[in-house]
Image: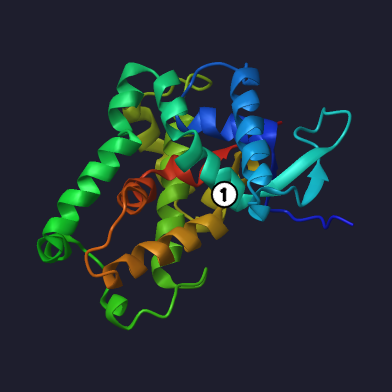
């Protein structure tokens, strides 16, 4: 029997999260859903068990029937790897400029590996990297990053078309949300937060400094992913 997990995603949910991250302004995700299903079928056909469904859930509260749901790793792989360039190409011009292509990241990684020591010296990596043991949700760096994501998401939410507040107006009433519990209450009423994915990515990023100049394009892409709050937070389906 499939087990029920809170951190699992249906194909429509993966499609919507991808469209939101790349700011693709349409609710019609059918074409992308077909691409996702094709990737999943190919992966399973080739023996990749990670892409097997792990349960069922409703994609939205209004959905009549539950759909097959997949691990968080599947969601991340599809959006950040398998169909990254597809999403990028569907985006608006300014969004395309914000997201590099996979080949761009591969080229950057090759250049960094050529002079890895210079790369290390330019990074602002934590003191504990040299004695890396892995971060948890309770670590100060994770707590700070979580707070940053919540703040950035709320600022974007309040300045979106549904409210149309100016930057000056938002700045004037942001102190109202200074108490952390108030800010978090407003955030979690409207957003989902992928804290597990954030911790995993931060740990992976820290471990890169032990790889001795063997970075991949995927590793280079991770650095930009960690800078973008949209990688870990998205509006809830209501």
Residue name at image x 47 percent, y 48 percent = 150
Q: Residue furthest front?
A: 46
**Residue at mark 1:** 193
* Residue 185 visible within the image: no
> Would you say 168 lies left or right of 46 here?
left
Q: Secondary structure at mark 1?
A: strand
Residue 76's place in the image compared with 167, above or below, is below
> Would you say 96 lies left or right of 184 here?
left
Residue name at image x 76 percent, y 32 percent = 60
Image quadrant containing the C terminus? top right
Residue name at image x 13 percent, y 57 percent = 114
Residue 179's place in the image compared with 30, above or below, is below
Residue name at image x 63 percent, y 52 percent = 48
Which image quarter: residue 167? top left
Task: Report the colour scheme.
Answer: rainbow
> Would you say 6 lies left or right of 15 here?
right
């Amino acid at each position: 029997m499939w087990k029920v997990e809170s951190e699992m995603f249906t194909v429509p949910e993966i499609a919507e999260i991808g469209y939101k991250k790349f700011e693709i302004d349409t609710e019609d995700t059918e074409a992308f859903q077909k691409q996702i299903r094709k990737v999943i079928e190919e992966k399973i056909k080739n023996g990749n068990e990670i892409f097997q469904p792990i349960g069922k859930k409703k994609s939205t509260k209004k959905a009549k029937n539950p759909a097959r749901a997949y691990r968080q790793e599947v969601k991340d792989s599809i959006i950040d790897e398998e169909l990254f360039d597809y999403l990028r190409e569907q985006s608006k011009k300014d969004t395309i400029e914000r997201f590099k292509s996979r080949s761009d990241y591969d080229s950057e990684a090759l250049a960094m590996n050529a002079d890895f020591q210079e790369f290390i010296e330019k990074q602002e990596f934590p003191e504990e990297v040299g004695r890396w043991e892995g971060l948890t949700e309770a670590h100060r760096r994770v707590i700070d990053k979580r707070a940053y994501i919540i703040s950035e998401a709320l600022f974007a939410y309040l300045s979106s078309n549904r409210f149309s507040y100016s930057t000056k107006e938002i700045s004037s009433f942001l102190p109202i949300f200074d108490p952390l519990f108030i800010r978090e209450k407003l955030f979690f009423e409207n957003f989902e937060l992928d804290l597990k994915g954030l911790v995993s990515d931060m740990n992976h990023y820290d471990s890169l400094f032990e790889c001795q100049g063997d970075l991949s394009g995927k590793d280079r892409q991770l650095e930009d992913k960690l800078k973008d709050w949209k990688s870990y937070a998205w509006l809830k389906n209501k």
